[in-house]
Image (cartoon, rainbow, N blue to C red):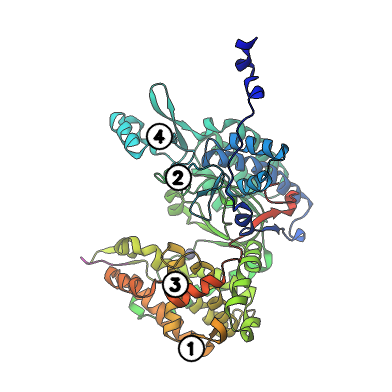
Amino acid sequence: MNALAPLLGLATLAVPASRLIFAPDIAERLRKLPATPIDYDRSLLDERETAALRELITASRPVSEIFLRQASTKNPELRDRLEAEVRDKAPGAPDALALFRIQAGPWDRIDRNVPFIGKDPKPPGAGFYPPEMTKAEFAAWIERHPGDRKAFEGLFTVIRRNASGLSAISYSREYRALLDSIIPRLRKAAETTGNASLRTYLTELSTALLDDDYYDSDLAWMDLDSEIEFILGPYEVYEDALFNYKAAFTAFVTVRDKAESAKLAVYAKHLPEMERNLPIPDEHKNFDRKFESPIRVVQEVFTAGDTRAGVQTSAFNLPNDERVRQAKGSKKVLLKNVMEAKYRVAGKPIAERFLDPAQLSSVTFDAFFNHTLFHELAHGLGPGFIKGPDGQKVEARLLLKDRYSTIEECKADVVGMWILLQAIDNGWITSVDETTLAVTVSAFFFRSIRFGADEAHGGGTAVQWNWFREKEAVVPAEDGRFRVAVPKFREAVRSLARELLMIEATGDLPRAERLLSTYMKSTPEMEAVNARLKDIPVDIAPVYVAAGEKGPMR
Ligand code: ZN
């Protein structure tokens, strides 16, 4: 009998498994991401589309299970242990499980992937490669097996170790059981919807998931013209920090916001006028650009997988496949209700600590939301192809090298302010005025600066803060607070927009370096503001009401 015990799994009964080790500050980590209900306006869909939407929520749930495995192959087993400890009433286990669900694993995504369960660091290759595999081993394998290169570097394979070495396994094989629970629901939703373009996308997607080829479904997604805006599949490659080769599964179930979409159509019509109004010489303006990439404003209903882990997405731009982008451009989707929740939980409280109280009434969600929207429009304005050093046509991106993304994000922020001022002047927009715009954007700089002025996201914002301080568009007020000097705002925006646009128009890397080394830095004044913001939530943990959730990931 004894000899059989291990085979029957009885050994684990005799020796109690050792308890998991939890970080002492898990409750504090949870407070940085408060559970926040996310819901949509039910009047936006009729009964038939509501039924299709329900199918899509169900179809999307297993996407979180796939992503959990992509983040770490050990995650499912660790979750089982956590759930067992919760049942055994182990101290700290419920909080550890809650944070595990929010972070899709035992590492804190909003704090440099610090482990909060156990001590093991996160493998850079996440669950896409054998945890102990190095870059050198991967490269050596391809060297010896050149025929494996395509599969090994592919977006839609995982690398596993077997008796004879490494092998690539397609997603459709690796995650087959979970895909088998997604596909029938997608087909059911396709039968249910009355929208032909949604039916086409869902049908193409059902095939793509089994073929590991998303070209046709991406094209169909670009053609999607439906009240339901939905996307599911493997897209972003950031989870693969080893090589950025492998795409992580994600799903967004959203509904188009009709009122905002109508306003957006008006702004889009004025894009050529906005280009003409840029504060740079005419020779650098770009009228060749086709203003084709659509923007959608939607209300989020449910998300799963990559996008749900850690910080919540407030806007996305897909697909990433360059072939699809060449053929049809890309689509930007802005998640208005998510932005509203972030504004309320993690944005407005910053303004309340930072601003002269007399100006607090000028901080509005409309100004915040429209600045984000105009940031997206601004990405499509300004120099594209420019004249390179040898007179050839070249993209500014290539000349500005690793500085380009900071410059371009900063440009989108500042040119976004500039064209929003133009929209206000011309009465294209009435829900925002110069004062609410100036005060709101200035009060929200610290939303990103608080995570570090030298980091990619906070960096571009630090440039704006330091520029505005120098131009005295923002000035110190009583007890460590600040006041926005509204009359100086427009000129501060104009001068910085001009600098950023000229850097892109000339592809002048030393000029970019100069701007960033002067303004992309933290000052004692900024550190003092950051210190006041410590306990304000960093982001939200969504609770999807329409999916019947009562708490995060439940
Ligand atoms: Zn951007």
Dot 1 lies on which element? helix
Residue 88 image offset from top left, x and y in percent:
71, 36
Going from N to C along the chain, the mark reached first, 4 or 1, is 4
Residue under pointer 1: 488
As measured in the structure, the alpha-carbon distance from the residue carrying label 1 to the one carrying label 2 is 44 Å
Dot 2 lies on which element? loop
- Viewer-proximal residue among 129 and 487: 129
Kind of residue at badge 2: Asp
Label 2 crowd bin: few (<14), some (14–19), many (20+), radius 10 Å? many
Q: Are marks 4 and 2 in contact (CB under 8 Å)?
A: no
Residue under pointer 4: 151
Residue 357 image offset from top left, x and y in percent:
63, 83
Q: Specify the quadrant of the image occupied by residue 332.
A: bottom right
Give residue 462's mark.
3
Label 4 crowd bin: few (<14), some (14–19), many (20+), radius 10 Å? some
Asked if the magenta segment contains residue 389, the reply would be yes
As measured in the structure, the alpha-carbon distance from the residue carrying label 2 to the one carrying label 3 is 28 Å
Relative horizontal placement of residue 97, taking residue 456 as reference (left or right): right
Which residue is painted at 28% across and 70% down in the image?
Answer: 508
Q: Which residues are magenta?
A: 386-390
- Per the picture, the main secondary structure of the magenta-coloured stretch is loop
Kind of residue at badge 1: Lys
Image quarter of the N terminus: top right
Q: Are marks 3 and 1 in contact (CB under 8 Å)?
A: no
